[in-house]
Image: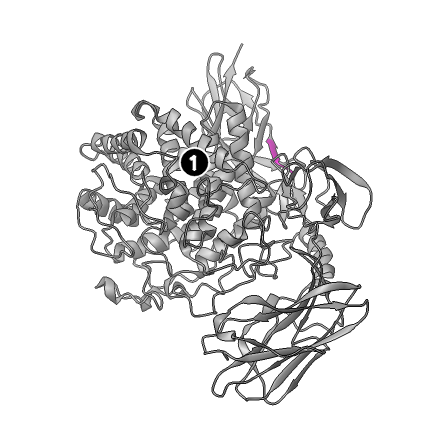
Amino acid sequence: MSMLARALTGALASLLIVGAAPPASAAPPAAIPHPLLTAPGAGVEVVSTTRDAGYRETGTWTQAQRTGYRGGTTRFTREVGATASWTLTAPAEDEYTIGVWIPFSSDVNDPATTYSWDGAAPVKVNQAAIGDAWHTIGTVRLAAGASLTVTVTARTSGKVTRADAVRLRSTKPSQDVLVNQSGYDLGASKRFTAPRAEDGSPFTVTREGSSTVLFSGTVTGGAGDFTAFNPSSPGPYVITVTGTAAGTGTSHPFGIGANWTYRVSLQRAIDFMVESRCAHGDATKLVFTDPAGNRCNRGNTGVAWRDDHQFSFSLQGLISMYLANPDAFTGTPGTGRYDGLAIPTTPDAPEIAKLVNWGVDLYLQGQVNHDLLKEQLAWFVHAYPHFSRWIPREQYVKARDHLVRLWGDPARDRWNWYDIAHTADLFQTYTVIGTGKGQFPPGHSIVPNLMMYEVAKRDGLPDPDRYLAAATAQAKWIVDNLDWNAPGTTKGQRMSEHVTVTSLVYLLRNHPDAAPPGLAEKIRQWADVLISRSANMWDFRKYSADLWIIPEFNEPGNVAGLPAAALAAAGVIDDAATAKALRRIAASHIDNVFGRNPADAHFSHDAATAEGFEGVERGWPKEYPPGRGAGELEEVRGVLDGSPKEASYPYDPNADLGYTEGWVAFNSAWNASLAQLSADRTKLHAPAAIQPGQSLSVRLRAALNLDAAAVETGRVRVTTSGGDSETFTVTEAGKSSRDFVATPPTATGTVSADDGRLQVLPGQTITIRYGLDGFAKKVTVRVVP
């Protein structure tokens, strides 16, 4: 753990011991008589769990297997008349609602459980109708220091009565301040939401525990902006808002640092893809002779990853992350289990290369023929030269020949779920799009066809122009037929929306001569709709003018994947104000994932644990029962489980959070965003011209500062028009810096590649690159006399 991580973890731990139950992996803390919580929707909360000193039982109770509220302990009984009681103490004279946390159960909970408290008649509650949610049972007024005992009594024979947590919550409105609970990126948009603050309410930014104001501003439209605050120290910081009706409120602590989001997210992104694989990395347990025979997981819903489906775009996400920022992945060999592959990698392959090969190998063993799975293999064959030192060429040839044979084949009978009527002939122009399930985003075939065009040219395969023509025709259909104002073409594509926009951008940027007329304008129109629908206090892109969320669906993948689309579009839009707005909205959706949302919680239920995300204090309050999900993803590190539903917006912190379950497709969308985020932040700087014999000053700005306490390195590739080719190490300018620098020497003379010196002559040019293929950034330097 880095020094910064230790500092933040220590600071936050002191808060968590007071304010919340510890993670499930931790030992139970000492009894806490009055655990006070600052929470959304209330000035003060008092929560008591089954692990607190004021908890008592009569009759026979048993500890449940799954964790309870905020990582606590759930107890249950089947004994009629058994009771469980919690005693809570009011911190101030106030009126409080009394709430009980009722956990989800696969058993049938008691429909007639009663709750009672001092001096009140029993209240009947149907525990069977509630799961992983707070339920209000009454209101009480208490003096400061007064105690209240709440008791649950089992009433129905043969049914399960559960005891977990009880809370007192002030009925007074609170000044809630919602932030990215982990931290913000230096030099990027930094915003927060204060839903109850009046326009003009002042806010301050201070170090946690300090009263010295470091930055100040005012709230407008429920939001505050501190983008201009770029401190030299990582914090932690807090924001305090002072309003009229709701008084004063303070945010969770958060950090600010170089490439903060990428740094705290990358390892969990890889952890998820490792731990969510079919058979947990042992392919010998899989059966590929018949698609119905593959027991990938309990739902049989994947070829290489559990609960993956053909439309999770898993290989695209992994390969994009590597191409956008290759040196972030090559430091150490992968340590995951990769048994049973027909063609394994070399032992020294980094984890991301082993993951890519895992997917390719199992897709080929499964003889996939669905168009979306063929497209994933196209990403691999196109990028293969960059993986060739770890993945044998035999794998490449197998994948390439498989694709050439099946690219125009209409059959799609192997490995598909939730599919819609279409054929798998990838030379066609698709005129159908998917539903809110996210299973068939428009434009999905554009980039794979462009990649096959380049592979065919590279390998001398027949008729490469056929692939290029298919890509152009598909993009033209989108330009001519899609109306971005129709929600089904944008947010209605759920976690797969990013595929459409990034594909259009890829064509425009990498094959501009093949782009149909009006493509750049079509991308700008998409941006205009996005910006218009994000004009609210959350900077959150709504589904439509009237709805916030995709109807009937859990949408963490759409929120997590939107930055990929927004950042890709920002890179090709000439209007500076539009591009700035797109980057602001991309940042706001990252913030939404990290807790700047009406639930005041990160989308991952384990986010606040040691296996979660640095600095986060509140993970998603609901969790699908461990081991019961279609992909058994509940305990996988980095899983994105839930997001606020329609009832939570514009702001109801007590709303039902609805269905919660992780999905590989959600995390793959997040991987796409991490790829575009690192690409968008990558910049190269060098002088416009140098003379032979001068050192070349190179400055790379890239998300390579993955250890905040260490000075790290990267590599840039430098070529000359005279034929020289060198790789130079760039070194971080300081700990947790955004910049990496090098001063490679130049000289005249005979070209000698890879000798650590550039041989150049006046009139030649020097090109410096970082990133690979469509994600490469470059700068050109002239050589002058």
Q: Which quadrant is the N terminus positioned in?
A: bottom right
In the image, is 309 to the left or to the right of 537? left
Q: In which quarter of the image is the C terminus?
A: top right
The picture quadrant where one finds residue 286 is bottom left
Give the vertical position of 395 relative to 751 (above or below). Answer: below
Q: Can residue 754 be seen in this view?
A: no
Q: How is the image coloured?
A: one colour
Residue in the foreground of this view, choosing between 588 and 775: 588
Q: Where residue 130 sits in the image (x, y, percent)?
A: 51, 69
Q: Name the residue under label 1.
A: 772
- Residue drawn at (77%, 68%) of the image: 142
Does residue 369 sit above or below 65 in this rendering?
A: above
Q: Does the magenta stretch include residue 739?
A: yes
Query: Taking 670 as reference, is 720 above or below it?
Result: above
User: Residue pushed farthest top?
Assistant: 785
Q: Can residue 400 be seen in this view?
A: yes
The quadrant in which residue 467 appears is: top left
Secondary structure character of the magenta stretch overall: strand
Does the magenta-highlighted stretch encompass residue 450? no
In this view of the protein, which residue sits in the foreground, 269 or 237?
Answer: 237
Graded by Cα atoms within 10 Å as few (under 14), some (14 to 19) or many (20 or more), the crowding at tag 1 reads: some
Q: What element carries label 1?
A: loop
The spot of residue 58 in percent (x, y) is 64, 88
Count the marks: how many?
Answer: 1
Residue range highlighted in magenta: 737-741
Q: What residue type is labelled 1?
A: Leu
Whole-percent x and y of residue 303?
Answer: 31, 58
Left/right of residue 290 with respect to residue 696 in the rendered view = left
For residue 6, above or below residue 715: below
Residue 116 at what x, y percent from top left? Answer: 65, 78
